[in-house]
Image (cartoon, rainbow, N blue to C red):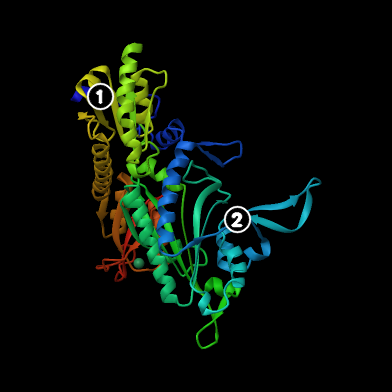
Amino acid sequence: MKETVEEQQDFVKDITKMSDDFDRWYTDVVRKAELADWSGVRGMMVVRPYGWAMWEAITRAFDDMIKESGHENWAFPLLIPRSYLMKEAEHVEGFAPEVAWVTRAGGDMEELEEPLAVRPTSETIIGALIKRYIQSHRDLPKLTNQWNSVVRWEMRSRLFLRSREFWWQEGHTFHASGQEAMEEAQLILGYYRSIAEDWLAVPVLSGKKTPAETFPGAVYTLTVEGLMRDGLALQMGTSHYFGQNFARAYDISFSNKDNERELCYSTSWGISTRLVGAIVMAHGDDSGLLVPPKVAPVQVVVVPIFRDDASRTKVEGFIDGWTRELKAAGIRHRVDWRDERPGDKYAHWELKGVPLRLNVGARDVDAGQVELVDRLSRERRAVPAAGIAARLQDELAAFQTRLFERAQKYLSDNTFELSTLDEVIAHFRERAGFVWAPWCGDAECEAKIKADTGGVTIRTIDSDEKASGKCLVCGKPAKYRVALAKAY
Ligand SMILES: [Zn+2]
Protein backbone atom coordinates (compact mmCIF):
# COMPACT_ATOMS: atom_id res chain seq x y z
CA MET A 1 0.00 0.00 0.00
CA LYS A 2 2.78 2.42 0.97
CA GLU A 3 4.48 1.94 -2.38
CA THR A 4 1.32 2.75 -4.24
CA VAL A 5 0.96 6.01 -2.38
CA GLU A 6 4.47 7.15 -3.19
CA GLU A 7 4.12 6.17 -6.81
CA GLN A 8 0.86 8.10 -6.97
CA GLN A 9 2.28 11.24 -5.44
CA ASP A 10 5.04 11.17 -7.96
CA PHE A 11 2.67 11.43 -10.92
CA VAL A 12 2.45 15.18 -10.75
CA LYS A 13 5.72 17.03 -11.29
CA ASP A 14 6.83 20.63 -11.66
CA ILE A 15 4.71 22.04 -8.87
CA THR A 16 6.46 23.83 -6.03
CA LYS A 17 5.88 21.91 -2.80
CA MET A 18 3.25 23.50 -0.60
CA SER A 19 5.54 23.29 2.42
CA ASP A 20 8.42 24.97 0.53
CA ASP A 21 6.56 28.04 -0.66
CA PHE A 22 2.80 28.26 -0.33
CA ASP A 23 2.43 31.30 -2.59
CA ARG A 24 4.36 29.72 -5.44
CA TRP A 25 2.55 26.43 -4.92
CA TYR A 26 -0.75 28.31 -5.23
CA THR A 27 0.22 30.08 -8.45
CA ASP A 28 1.65 26.86 -9.92
CA VAL A 29 -1.57 24.97 -9.21
CA VAL A 30 -3.88 27.70 -10.50
CA ARG A 31 -1.95 27.99 -13.76
CA LYS A 32 -1.05 24.35 -14.36
CA ALA A 33 -4.50 23.04 -13.51
CA GLU A 34 -5.75 25.60 -16.06
CA LEU A 35 -7.99 27.56 -13.70
CA ALA A 36 -6.80 31.05 -14.61
CA ASP A 37 -3.99 33.06 -16.07
CA TRP A 38 -2.76 36.63 -16.24
CA SER A 39 -3.78 38.62 -19.30
CA GLY A 40 -2.11 41.40 -21.28
CA VAL A 41 -3.80 43.89 -18.94
CA ARG A 42 -1.81 44.27 -15.75
CA GLY A 43 -3.60 42.82 -12.74
CA MET A 44 -6.50 41.44 -14.78
CA MET A 45 -7.01 37.73 -15.19
CA VAL A 46 -8.40 35.28 -17.69
CA VAL A 47 -10.57 32.67 -16.02
CA ARG A 48 -10.08 29.51 -18.04
CA PRO A 49 -12.89 27.00 -18.72
CA TYR A 50 -11.96 24.61 -15.89
CA GLY A 51 -11.95 27.44 -13.34
CA TRP A 52 -15.04 29.06 -14.83
CA ALA A 53 -16.93 25.75 -14.58
CA MET A 54 -16.35 25.77 -10.80
CA TRP A 55 -17.60 29.35 -10.59
CA GLU A 56 -20.64 28.32 -12.67
CA ALA A 57 -21.44 25.53 -10.22
CA ILE A 58 -21.30 28.07 -7.38
CA THR A 59 -23.46 30.56 -9.28
CA ARG A 60 -26.09 27.93 -10.03
CA ALA A 61 -26.26 26.82 -6.41
CA PHE A 62 -26.51 30.37 -5.07
CA ASP A 63 -28.89 31.56 -7.78
CA ASP A 64 -31.26 28.72 -6.86
CA MET A 65 -31.13 29.74 -3.19
CA ILE A 66 -31.97 33.40 -3.79
CA LYS A 67 -34.68 32.65 -6.38
CA GLU A 68 -36.29 30.29 -3.88
CA SER A 69 -36.63 33.18 -1.43
CA GLY A 70 -38.05 35.58 -4.01
CA HIS A 71 -35.03 37.50 -5.29
CA GLU A 72 -34.85 38.61 -8.92
CA ASN A 73 -31.82 39.19 -11.12
CA TRP A 74 -31.38 42.33 -13.16
CA ALA A 75 -28.55 44.30 -14.76
CA PHE A 76 -27.17 47.82 -14.28
CA PRO A 77 -24.60 49.73 -16.37
CA LEU A 78 -20.88 49.08 -16.07
CA LEU A 79 -20.18 52.83 -15.81
CA ILE A 80 -21.31 55.12 -13.02
CA PRO A 81 -21.46 58.95 -13.35
CA ARG A 82 -19.17 60.64 -10.82
CA SER A 83 -22.07 62.59 -9.36
CA TYR A 84 -23.82 59.32 -8.39
CA LEU A 85 -20.69 57.98 -6.77
CA MET A 86 -20.10 61.10 -4.68
CA LYS A 87 -23.38 61.08 -2.75
CA GLU A 88 -22.61 58.68 0.10
CA ALA A 89 -19.54 60.23 1.78
CA GLU A 90 -18.25 57.20 3.67
CA HIS A 91 -18.75 54.93 0.69
CA VAL A 92 -16.85 57.30 -1.63
CA GLU A 93 -14.02 57.63 0.85
CA GLY A 94 -13.75 53.85 1.18
CA PHE A 95 -13.65 53.16 -2.54
CA ALA A 96 -11.93 56.27 -3.96
CA PRO A 97 -8.38 54.82 -3.98
CA GLU A 98 -9.53 51.81 -6.03
CA VAL A 99 -11.76 53.43 -8.67
CA ALA A 100 -10.81 53.37 -12.37
CA TRP A 101 -12.26 56.19 -14.50
CA VAL A 102 -13.33 56.62 -18.09
CA THR A 103 -12.63 60.24 -19.02
CA ARG A 104 -12.34 60.14 -22.81
CA ALA A 105 -14.27 58.42 -25.59
CA GLY A 106 -14.81 58.32 -29.34
CA GLY A 107 -12.52 58.50 -32.36
CA ASP A 108 -10.97 61.81 -31.32
CA MET A 109 -10.71 60.71 -27.71
CA GLU A 110 -12.81 63.64 -26.68
CA GLU A 111 -12.99 64.49 -23.01
CA LEU A 112 -16.33 63.51 -21.42
CA GLU A 113 -18.41 66.17 -19.70
CA GLU A 114 -18.59 64.05 -16.60
CA PRO A 115 -16.05 61.33 -15.77
CA LEU A 116 -17.54 57.84 -15.50
CA ALA A 117 -16.37 55.36 -12.87
CA VAL A 118 -16.00 51.73 -13.82
CA ARG A 119 -18.18 50.18 -11.14
CA PRO A 120 -16.27 48.99 -8.07
CA THR A 121 -19.70 47.87 -6.76
CA SER A 122 -23.17 49.18 -7.70
CA GLU A 123 -24.79 50.60 -4.55
CA THR A 124 -24.51 54.14 -5.87
CA ILE A 125 -26.08 53.67 -9.30
CA ILE A 126 -28.79 51.40 -7.95
CA GLY A 127 -29.39 53.88 -5.14
CA ALA A 128 -29.69 56.72 -7.65
CA LEU A 129 -32.18 54.86 -9.83
CA ILE A 130 -34.20 52.58 -7.58
CA LYS A 131 -36.55 55.38 -6.45
CA ARG A 132 -38.22 55.11 -9.85
CA TYR A 133 -39.47 51.69 -8.84
CA ILE A 134 -40.33 52.33 -5.21
CA GLN A 135 -43.27 54.58 -4.40
CA SER A 136 -45.36 52.87 -1.77
CA HIS A 137 -45.00 50.20 0.90
CA ARG A 138 -46.72 47.92 -1.61
CA ASP A 139 -43.55 48.08 -3.76
CA LEU A 140 -41.48 46.65 -0.90
CA PRO A 141 -39.50 44.59 -0.30
CA LYS A 142 -37.44 44.88 -3.49
CA LEU A 143 -35.19 41.83 -3.54
CA THR A 144 -32.65 42.14 -6.35
CA ASN A 145 -29.35 40.71 -7.47
CA GLN A 146 -26.99 41.09 -10.40
CA TRP A 147 -24.24 38.82 -11.73
CA ASN A 148 -21.44 40.88 -13.21
CA SER A 149 -17.81 41.83 -12.94
CA VAL A 150 -16.39 44.85 -11.15
CA VAL A 151 -13.07 46.70 -11.24
CA ARG A 152 -10.98 47.71 -8.24
CA TRP A 153 -7.58 49.19 -9.01
CA GLU A 154 -5.51 47.02 -6.67
CA MET A 155 -1.78 47.59 -6.53
CA ARG A 156 -0.90 44.02 -5.60
CA SER A 157 -2.46 41.19 -7.56
CA ARG A 158 -3.05 37.52 -6.96
CA LEU A 159 -5.02 35.18 -9.23
CA PHE A 160 -8.64 34.89 -7.97
CA LEU A 161 -7.85 36.51 -4.60
CA ARG A 162 -6.94 40.01 -5.64
CA SER A 163 -7.30 41.03 -9.27
CA ARG A 164 -8.31 44.33 -10.78
CA GLU A 165 -11.38 42.77 -12.31
CA PHE A 166 -13.32 39.97 -10.66
CA TRP A 167 -16.68 38.30 -11.20
CA TRP A 168 -19.31 38.19 -8.50
CA GLN A 169 -22.90 38.66 -7.59
CA GLU A 170 -24.10 41.77 -5.85
CA GLY A 171 -27.42 41.58 -4.08
CA HIS A 172 -29.27 44.81 -3.28
CA THR A 173 -32.48 44.78 -1.29
CA PHE A 174 -34.83 47.48 -0.02
CA HIS A 175 -37.24 47.09 2.86
CA ALA A 176 -39.93 48.93 4.78
CA SER A 177 -38.43 48.14 8.18
CA GLY A 178 -34.99 47.82 9.71
CA GLN A 179 -35.95 44.53 11.30
CA GLU A 180 -36.82 43.04 7.93
CA ALA A 181 -33.58 44.29 6.34
CA MET A 182 -31.53 42.84 9.21
CA GLU A 183 -33.28 39.50 8.75
CA GLU A 184 -32.43 39.66 5.05
CA ALA A 185 -28.71 40.24 5.80
CA GLN A 186 -28.82 37.25 8.16
CA LEU A 187 -30.66 35.05 5.64
CA ILE A 188 -27.97 35.69 3.03
CA LEU A 189 -25.22 35.02 5.56
CA GLY A 190 -26.82 31.59 6.05
CA TYR A 191 -26.73 31.01 2.29
CA TYR A 192 -23.07 31.96 2.20
CA ARG A 193 -22.33 29.56 5.02
CA SER A 194 -24.10 26.85 3.04
CA ILE A 195 -22.14 27.63 -0.14
CA ALA A 196 -18.88 27.45 1.83
CA GLU A 197 -19.66 24.39 3.92
CA ASP A 198 -22.15 22.29 1.93
CA TRP A 199 -20.80 23.04 -1.55
CA LEU A 200 -17.14 23.94 -1.16
CA ALA A 201 -16.55 21.73 1.91
CA VAL A 202 -14.87 24.64 3.71
CA PRO A 203 -16.03 25.08 7.34
CA VAL A 204 -16.35 28.75 8.30
CA LEU A 205 -16.57 31.07 11.27
CA SER A 206 -19.37 33.56 10.82
CA GLY A 207 -20.44 36.72 12.56
CA LYS A 208 -20.16 40.50 12.61
CA LYS A 209 -17.13 42.54 11.56
CA THR A 210 -15.74 45.23 13.85
CA PRO A 211 -16.56 48.87 12.90
CA ALA A 212 -13.02 49.24 11.47
CA GLU A 213 -13.61 46.27 9.13
CA THR A 214 -17.16 47.25 8.16
CA PHE A 215 -18.07 47.95 4.51
CA PRO A 216 -17.91 51.70 3.76
CA GLY A 217 -21.39 53.16 4.38
CA ALA A 218 -22.81 50.12 6.20
CA VAL A 219 -24.22 50.01 9.74
CA TYR A 220 -22.69 46.57 10.10
CA THR A 221 -21.13 43.81 8.01
CA LEU A 222 -21.60 40.07 8.47
CA THR A 223 -18.93 37.69 7.20
CA VAL A 224 -18.02 34.06 6.65
CA GLU A 225 -14.31 33.30 7.12
CA GLY A 226 -12.53 30.10 6.16
CA LEU A 227 -9.05 28.87 7.05
CA MET A 228 -6.66 28.09 4.22
CA ARG A 229 -3.96 25.41 4.43
CA ASP A 230 -1.22 27.96 5.16
CA GLY A 231 -3.17 29.00 8.26
CA LEU A 232 -4.35 32.31 6.80
CA ALA A 233 -8.00 33.29 6.95
CA LEU A 234 -9.97 34.07 3.81
CA GLN A 235 -13.09 36.22 3.82
CA MET A 236 -15.46 34.15 1.68
CA GLY A 237 -18.59 36.31 1.58
CA THR A 238 -20.02 39.42 3.20
CA SER A 239 -23.55 40.67 3.84
CA HIS A 240 -24.13 44.31 4.79
CA TYR A 241 -26.94 46.04 6.63
CA PHE A 242 -27.14 49.73 5.64
CA GLY A 243 -29.96 50.89 7.87
CA GLN A 244 -31.21 54.07 6.16
CA ASN A 245 -27.73 55.36 5.21
CA PHE A 246 -28.03 54.81 1.48
CA ALA A 247 -31.71 55.71 1.41
CA ARG A 248 -30.84 59.05 3.02
CA ALA A 249 -28.01 59.78 0.57
CA TYR A 250 -30.08 58.83 -2.50
CA ASP A 251 -33.52 59.84 -1.25
CA ILE A 252 -35.07 56.39 -1.51
CA SER A 253 -38.38 56.69 0.25
CA PHE A 254 -41.86 55.17 0.21
CA SER A 255 -45.28 56.10 1.52
CA ASN A 256 -46.12 53.91 4.49
CA LYS A 257 -49.54 52.58 5.50
CA ASP A 258 -50.41 55.92 7.14
CA ASN A 259 -49.49 57.64 3.88
CA GLU A 260 -46.38 59.26 5.34
CA ARG A 261 -43.05 59.35 3.52
CA GLU A 262 -40.41 57.14 5.11
CA LEU A 263 -36.85 56.23 4.14
CA CYS A 264 -36.15 52.64 3.06
CA TYR A 265 -33.81 50.25 4.80
CA SER A 266 -31.36 48.44 2.56
CA THR A 267 -28.80 45.65 2.36
CA SER A 268 -26.13 44.49 -0.06
CA TRP A 269 -24.15 41.26 -0.22
CA GLY A 270 -21.62 39.49 -2.40
CA ILE A 271 -19.55 36.43 -3.14
CA SER A 272 -16.97 36.35 -5.89
CA THR A 273 -14.59 34.27 -8.01
CA ARG A 274 -12.28 34.47 -5.00
CA LEU A 275 -14.13 31.32 -3.90
CA VAL A 276 -12.35 29.38 -6.66
CA GLY A 277 -9.10 30.43 -4.96
CA ALA A 278 -10.58 29.16 -1.68
CA ILE A 279 -11.12 25.71 -3.22
CA VAL A 280 -7.44 25.62 -4.20
CA MET A 281 -6.10 26.85 -0.86
CA ALA A 282 -8.45 24.97 1.46
CA HIS A 283 -8.12 21.50 -0.10
CA GLY A 284 -5.08 21.32 -2.40
CA ASP A 285 -1.92 19.28 -1.81
CA ASP A 286 1.49 18.74 -3.40
CA SER A 287 -0.12 16.95 -6.35
CA GLY A 288 -2.43 19.88 -7.08
CA LEU A 289 -6.15 20.47 -6.65
CA LEU A 290 -8.77 18.52 -4.74
CA VAL A 291 -12.17 19.62 -5.96
CA PRO A 292 -15.30 19.03 -3.90
CA PRO A 293 -17.59 16.76 -6.00
CA LYS A 294 -20.52 19.20 -5.82
CA VAL A 295 -18.62 21.86 -7.75
CA ALA A 296 -16.24 19.60 -9.70
CA PRO A 297 -16.40 20.18 -13.47
CA VAL A 298 -15.37 16.51 -13.83
CA GLN A 299 -16.43 14.26 -10.95
CA VAL A 300 -15.26 10.97 -12.41
CA VAL A 301 -12.57 10.39 -15.01
CA VAL A 302 -12.22 7.07 -16.80
CA VAL A 303 -8.73 6.08 -17.98
CA PRO A 304 -8.76 3.20 -20.48
CA ILE A 305 -5.65 1.00 -20.46
CA PHE A 306 -4.87 -1.09 -23.54
CA ARG A 307 -1.91 -2.47 -25.49
CA ASP A 308 -3.25 -2.95 -29.00
CA ASP A 309 -6.30 -2.34 -31.18
CA ALA A 310 -7.97 -5.55 -30.09
CA SER A 311 -7.76 -4.74 -26.39
CA ARG A 312 -8.76 -1.13 -27.10
CA THR A 313 -11.96 -2.32 -28.82
CA LYS A 314 -12.69 -4.62 -25.94
CA VAL A 315 -12.16 -1.90 -23.31
CA GLU A 316 -14.11 0.66 -25.31
CA GLY A 317 -17.16 -1.61 -25.70
CA PHE A 318 -17.13 -2.29 -21.96
CA ILE A 319 -16.88 1.40 -21.00
CA ASP A 320 -19.63 2.39 -23.46
CA GLY A 321 -21.83 -0.17 -21.73
CA TRP A 322 -22.02 1.78 -18.47
CA THR A 323 -21.05 5.40 -19.22
CA ARG A 324 -24.62 5.85 -20.46
CA GLU A 325 -25.78 5.03 -16.93
CA LEU A 326 -23.43 7.67 -15.53
CA LYS A 327 -24.89 10.23 -17.89
CA ALA A 328 -28.44 9.29 -16.96
CA ALA A 329 -27.51 9.61 -13.27
CA GLY A 330 -26.14 13.13 -13.87
CA ILE A 331 -22.57 12.22 -12.97
CA ARG A 332 -20.15 14.64 -14.66
CA HIS A 333 -17.61 12.29 -16.20
CA ARG A 334 -15.06 12.10 -18.96
CA VAL A 335 -13.38 9.17 -20.71
CA ASP A 336 -9.78 10.12 -21.43
CA TRP A 337 -8.93 8.72 -24.87
CA ARG A 338 -6.10 11.21 -25.45
CA ASP A 339 -2.97 9.76 -26.98
CA GLU A 340 -0.95 9.79 -23.76
CA ARG A 341 0.47 7.14 -21.44
CA PRO A 342 -1.82 6.13 -18.53
CA GLY A 343 0.69 7.51 -15.99
CA ASP A 344 0.57 10.95 -17.64
CA LYS A 345 -3.21 10.85 -17.64
CA TYR A 346 -3.24 10.00 -13.91
CA ALA A 347 -0.97 13.00 -13.29
CA HIS A 348 -3.15 15.27 -15.42
CA TRP A 349 -6.36 14.43 -13.52
CA GLU A 350 -4.68 14.39 -10.12
CA LEU A 351 -3.44 17.91 -10.76
CA LYS A 352 -6.97 18.92 -11.72
CA GLY A 353 -8.27 17.37 -8.50
CA VAL A 354 -10.91 15.10 -10.03
CA PRO A 355 -12.42 13.24 -7.06
CA LEU A 356 -12.67 9.75 -8.55
CA ARG A 357 -10.71 7.98 -11.26
CA LEU A 358 -11.62 4.67 -12.87
CA ASN A 359 -8.82 2.67 -14.45
CA VAL A 360 -10.12 0.11 -16.92
CA GLY A 361 -7.90 -2.54 -18.53
CA ALA A 362 -8.61 -5.74 -20.47
CA ARG A 363 -8.38 -7.83 -17.29
CA ASP A 364 -10.98 -5.61 -15.62
CA VAL A 365 -13.30 -6.21 -18.57
CA ASP A 366 -12.98 -9.98 -18.07
CA ALA A 367 -13.75 -9.59 -14.38
CA GLY A 368 -16.67 -7.21 -15.08
CA GLN A 369 -15.15 -4.54 -12.84
CA VAL A 370 -13.20 -1.28 -12.77
CA GLU A 371 -10.41 -0.04 -10.52
CA LEU A 372 -11.61 2.95 -8.51
CA VAL A 373 -8.95 5.39 -7.26
CA ASP A 374 -9.91 8.07 -4.78
CA ARG A 375 -8.07 11.46 -4.98
CA LEU A 376 -8.38 11.99 -1.23
CA SER A 377 -7.39 8.61 0.28
CA ARG A 378 -5.54 7.46 -2.88
CA GLU A 379 -6.90 3.97 -2.18
CA ARG A 380 -7.53 1.62 -5.08
CA ARG A 381 -10.57 -0.62 -4.95
CA ALA A 382 -12.16 -3.03 -7.41
CA VAL A 383 -15.75 -2.04 -8.11
CA PRO A 384 -18.23 -4.15 -10.14
CA ALA A 385 -19.51 -2.55 -13.31
CA ALA A 386 -23.01 -3.71 -12.46
CA GLY A 387 -24.81 -0.92 -10.59
CA ILE A 388 -21.84 1.42 -11.01
CA ALA A 389 -23.83 4.67 -11.32
CA ALA A 390 -25.48 4.26 -7.91
CA ARG A 391 -22.16 3.21 -6.40
CA LEU A 392 -20.37 6.28 -7.76
CA GLN A 393 -23.10 8.58 -6.50
CA ASP A 394 -22.56 7.16 -3.02
CA GLU A 395 -18.78 7.45 -3.40
CA LEU A 396 -19.06 11.11 -4.47
CA ALA A 397 -21.32 11.96 -1.55
CA ALA A 398 -18.92 10.21 0.84
CA PHE A 399 -15.98 12.06 -0.74
CA GLN A 400 -17.72 15.40 -0.20
CA THR A 401 -18.29 14.52 3.46
CA ARG A 402 -14.73 13.29 4.04
CA LEU A 403 -13.29 16.42 2.45
CA PHE A 404 -15.41 18.60 4.74
CA GLU A 405 -14.44 16.54 7.79
CA ARG A 406 -10.77 16.82 6.92
CA ALA A 407 -11.11 20.59 6.59
CA GLN A 408 -13.06 20.71 9.86
CA LYS A 409 -10.30 18.83 11.67
CA TYR A 410 -7.74 21.21 10.17
CA LEU A 411 -9.81 24.15 11.41
CA SER A 412 -10.17 22.80 14.93
CA ASP A 413 -6.47 21.78 15.09
CA ASN A 414 -5.59 25.36 14.13
CA THR A 415 -7.98 27.26 16.36
CA PHE A 416 -6.64 28.50 19.70
CA GLU A 417 -7.80 30.45 22.74
CA LEU A 418 -5.48 33.08 24.23
CA SER A 419 -5.96 35.92 26.67
CA THR A 420 -3.10 38.43 26.41
CA LEU A 421 -1.50 40.41 23.60
CA ASP A 422 1.94 38.99 24.49
CA GLU A 423 0.59 35.46 23.99
CA VAL A 424 -0.98 36.49 20.69
CA ILE A 425 2.26 38.09 19.46
CA ALA A 426 4.25 34.98 20.44
CA HIS A 427 1.68 32.73 18.79
CA PHE A 428 1.71 34.48 15.42
CA ARG A 429 5.50 34.60 15.45
CA GLU A 430 5.50 30.78 15.38
CA ARG A 431 2.32 29.81 13.61
CA ALA A 432 -1.00 30.95 12.14
CA GLY A 433 -4.65 29.86 12.43
CA PHE A 434 -7.53 31.45 14.32
CA VAL A 435 -7.06 32.72 17.86
CA TRP A 436 -10.09 33.51 20.00
CA ALA A 437 -9.46 36.31 22.47
CA PRO A 438 -11.43 38.75 24.63
CA TRP A 439 -11.67 42.38 23.42
CA CYS A 440 -13.09 45.52 25.02
CA GLY A 441 -14.47 46.96 21.78
CA ASP A 442 -12.14 49.99 21.56
CA ALA A 443 -10.70 50.80 18.14
CA GLU A 444 -7.33 51.72 19.71
CA CYS A 445 -6.93 48.23 21.15
CA GLU A 446 -7.86 46.74 17.76
CA ALA A 447 -5.27 48.95 16.02
CA LYS A 448 -2.62 47.96 18.56
CA ILE A 449 -3.22 44.26 17.89
CA LYS A 450 -2.68 44.85 14.18
CA ALA A 451 0.42 47.00 14.68
CA ASP A 452 2.14 44.81 17.28
CA THR A 453 1.52 41.50 15.47
CA GLY A 454 2.45 42.68 12.00
CA GLY A 455 -1.02 42.54 10.48
CA VAL A 456 -3.22 40.21 12.52
CA THR A 457 -6.80 41.47 12.38
CA ILE A 458 -10.12 40.74 14.04
CA ARG A 459 -11.89 38.57 11.48
CA THR A 460 -15.22 38.28 13.24
CA ILE A 461 -17.00 38.79 16.54
CA ASP A 462 -18.41 35.64 18.14
CA SER A 463 -22.19 35.74 17.82
CA ASP A 464 -22.81 32.70 20.06
CA GLU A 465 -20.56 33.01 23.04
CA LYS A 466 -20.41 36.03 25.36
CA ALA A 467 -17.02 37.43 26.26
CA SER A 468 -15.50 36.75 29.64
CA GLY A 469 -12.33 38.08 31.25
CA LYS A 470 -10.36 41.17 30.31
CA CYS A 471 -9.46 42.79 26.98
CA LEU A 472 -6.24 41.24 25.70
CA VAL A 473 -4.74 44.71 25.15
CA CYS A 474 -5.93 47.16 27.82
CA GLY A 475 -7.17 44.83 30.56
CA LYS A 476 -10.59 46.51 30.81
CA PRO A 477 -13.60 44.17 31.01
CA ALA A 478 -14.09 42.44 27.64
CA LYS A 479 -17.29 43.05 25.69
CA TYR A 480 -16.64 40.66 22.81
CA ARG A 481 -15.03 37.33 22.06
CA VAL A 482 -13.23 37.80 18.75
CA ALA A 483 -11.41 35.59 16.25
CA LEU A 484 -7.96 36.91 15.29
CA ALA A 485 -6.03 35.81 12.22
CA LYS A 486 -3.72 36.85 9.47
CA ALA A 487 -5.83 37.07 6.39
CA TYR A 488 -5.71 37.38 2.61
ZN1 LIG B 1 -9.10 47.06 25.18
The single residue placed furthest to the left in the displayed view is 1
Q: Position of residue 263 (x, y in %)?
A: 54, 78
Q: Is residue 42 above or below residue 379?
A: below
Mark 2 surroundings within 10 Å by alpha-carbon count, few (fewer than 14), some (14 through 19), many (20 or more): many
**Secondary structure under badge 1?**
helix
The structure residue drawn at horizontal position 41% and vertical position 56%, both measured from the top left corner, is 64
Q: Is residue 459 visible?
A: no
Task: Please tell me in which quarter of the rendered image ligand 1 is found.
Answer: bottom left
Looking at the rendering, in which quadrant would you find the N terminus?
top left
Question: Dot 2: what SS?
Answer: loop
- From this view, report whether residue 219 is shown above or below residue 330: below
The residue tagged 2 is: 119
With 474 as the anchor, is 82 left or right in this view?
A: right
**Mark 1 closeness class: few <14, some 14–19, many ≥20 residues within 10 Å:** few
Instruction: Name which quarter of the figure residue 261 lies in.
Output: bottom right
Task: Tell me the kind of residue under disc 1.
Answer: Glu
**Closer to the camera, 328 or 164?**
328
Q: Is residue 202 visible?
A: yes
Identity of the residue drawn at 44% across and 71% down: 181
Vertical placement of 315 versus 164: above or below? above
Indicate which disc, 1 or 2, sits on the residue closer to the N terminus.
1
Residue at numbered disc 1: 6
Task: Indicate whether 92 appears above or below 383.
Answer: below
